[in-house]
Amino acid sequence: MVRQFDASRLRPRCVAYEPNANYIAIGFTSGIVKVLDPSTLEDVATFKNAKEPIVDISFSPLGDMFATADADHHVAVWKLSLERIVEEEGPEAEADPMAEATIKATWIYLGRHRSHWRPITALEFGLRDDGRQTLVSVGEDRCLVEYDLDESSVGSGVVLKEPPKRIEVSAVPTAATWHPLLGTGANRDFEDRVVTANSEYKLMQWNADNKSCRRTTLGPTFGQPINKLLPLVKPSPRDPDTDAADSIPHPRLGYLAYSTCEKVVGLCKMPLDGNPNKAMGLIAHPGPISCIAVSHDSQTLVTAGGTDATVNLWQINTEVLDAAEAGSYPEPRLNEAGEAVAEDEMTPKERAEATRTRMAPFLALLEGGEGGEAVGSLEGELLPRPSS
């Protein structure tokens, strides 16, 4: 099925598919936003609330909101309104929940906010651990902005959760995503985090509440800096004994797909700790990469090129990353029963050696590797010297 737009008036710039497959939203270079029916590609709604091109568009995890970013640094938000229309007339029929009725869905424009003063590089919806939806953006002004979707309305417009937070000094944020909550029950992550990538190949994790930096690690260094991060999402039920929001789908897979602005796409494995063996990249296109997407079951990565006018589909195999990570560490020491020896059962010398083996992938990043001059210099500065 194909729908062709009049290129003189409508030139598509970005597109997003609603998670429940009920709508497609398209942003155009003229500032127009269209919502289409995916079964027919006919218009459901058309909006003209911006004069500059729409550069990014995103749906919320539950599919009841979508947001756009334009070239004039505005973020706009729409919300889905559902109205129950009873076919029979009279107050009794309207009050009867069993009466025959139809549901009328309408997209309502809430407003927009000029939250950045330089181009916006990422616009991402997320789902908090308590089930609340939220929206963040980052831009070349080095600021992270969170929007208060509960307080945003037609009357109040798009409301910020707090003033923009400056998160970089010299580097420029190039991408962002919400960190998947790993684990279940009492073992799952205790806080919501936002992951940002920057122009210096760093991946930074920020506490979503106070915006403090929790961790900075080296990201993939294949090609140019990352410009898009997508978590591999697979909905799974939560534990009803420990998590009240068990009916809400939530990311559970510990992997991210990424793209750079030219040629390279890849995967990286969580937790993000800087281990180079937990990331891979490949040349997907001969030139610019316009966008990437992950299938609903996280089994396929879709990449779209630029001048090559090509869309490629890649099968995702995370077992390769698992094997690469496992191969980066030496085999653990075994006891007579063939079981791995716990650290509390080791001598201090054995414990130090075990720690050193875990550091092997990171020591290899230093100039000269594990036995190089850089490692020797660090050991001379940090390790205690014998007393004379």
Image (tube, helix red, strand yellow):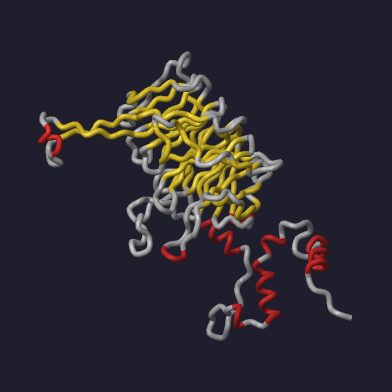
Residue 99 versus residue 250: which sits nearer the camera?
99
Name which residue lies at 50% across and 44% down.
Answer: 230
**Spot occupied by residue 43 in the image (x, y as percentages of width and height):** 34, 23
Would you place residue 314 above or below residue 47 in this image? below
The part of the image, by quadrant, that contains residue 229 is top right
Is 339 left or right of 35, judged from the image as shown? right
**Spot occupied by residue 67 in the image (x, y as percentages of width and height):** 45, 33
Q: In this view, which residue lies farthest toward the top?
A: 8
Name which residue lies at 47% across and 55% down.
Answer: 181
The part of the image, by quadrant, that contains residue 164 is top right
Is 161 left or right of 23, judged from the image as shown? right
The part of the image, by quadrant, that contains residue 258 is top right
Where does the N terminus fall, quadrant-wise?
top left
Residue 99 versus residue 177: which sits nearer the camera?
99
Name which residue lies at 60% across and 80% down.
Answer: 344
Name which residue lies at 50% across and 41% down.
Answer: 161
Would you place residue 63 above or below residue 249 in this image? above
Would you place residue 228 above or below residue 377 in this image? above
Q: In this view, which residue lies farthest toward the bottom?
A: 336
Is 141 left or right of 59, judged from the image as shown? right
Where does the C terminus fall, quadrant-wise?
bottom right
Q: In this view, which residue lies farthest toward the right?
A: 388
Is 326 left or right of 101, judged from the image as shown? right
Residue 109 versus residue 125: which sits nearer the camera?
109
**Spot occupied by residue 245 in the image (x, y as percentages of width and height):** 36, 55
**Spot occupied by residue 298 in the image (x, y as percentages of width and height):** 43, 48
Q: How many marks?
A: 0
